[in-house]
Amino acid sequence: MKKVLLGFAATGILLAGCTTTDPNTGQVVRDNTKTNAIIGAAVGAAAGYATNTNKGEQGRKNAIIGAGIGALGGAAVGNYMDKQQAELRKKLANTGVTVDRNGNVITLNMPSDVTFPVNGDQVDTRFYKVLDDVSGVLKDYPSTYIDVIGHADSTGADDYNQALSERRANSVANYMSSRGVAYQRIYVAGAGETRPIASNDTESGRAQNRRVEVTLRPVEQ
């Protein structure tokens, strides 16, 4: 998986649980208030940690704290993620974007068919309102890491799909940062066609694989 730099043209900066029913959507979701475990592998940090030479997860955490964003501890972690999940589900109902939860990790799945024009890598203007709403919630809940990962189906050459997945992820990340989401929180990468979630043998499966995933993880003490 390649790392992609999150660019800012104007500034030059590089860049588990019981179930409950969501009162806003009626969807059965996990209640993770008492869950403190982070599920999922740690990712390497993107470039842009001007105040820290450590390019790993600790360097990323230090950059976030250095930007004045607080870390979470104890039972506050699960409660914080519960509230953020509820807000995202409310904002994203009927938009085509799914909000999934695994422990204290929230993943927003943005299908490319609703996010980008066919074969395009710039966010469709009709999707701006959705990303505006996502960005608003992310600003209200700053104590989370944001990983933006692009994915492609298996149609076409591997290198083309890799590059396209990177560009799409970067477009989503840049849009969110332009709406005030702190760049220190964001990691951007493309996975190309290497991480399908459905069969590439059918059109419906390929459509599911063409996506951008935004994963939110708590910044813990």
Image (cartoon, rainbow, N blue to C red):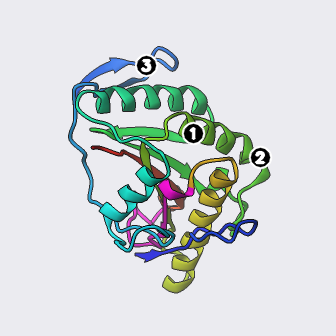
Dot 3: within a 10 Å radius of its alpha carbon, few (fewer than 14), some, or many (20 or more) residues?
some
Whole-number angstrom distance, CA of label 1 to CA of label 2: 22 Å
Q: Nearer the viewer, mark 1 or mark 2?
A: 1
Looking at the rendered structure, the kind of residue marked 3 is: Asp
Mark 1 or mark 3, earlier in chain? 3
Is 118 rendered above or below residue 19? below
Q: Quadrant of the C terminus?
A: top left
The range drawn in magenta is: 183-203
Q: Residue at x 71, y 66 (%)?
A: 11
Could you say where residue 53 lies in the image, as x and y percent from the top left?
38, 74
Disc 2 element = helix
Residue behind mark 3: 22
Amino acid found under the numbered disc labelled 2: Arg
Mark 1, residue position: 139
Mark 1 is surrounded, within 10 Å at the Cα level, by few (under 14), some (14 to 19) or many (20 or more) other residues, namely: some
Position in image of residue 167 (x %, y %): 61, 71
The disc at residue 126 is 2
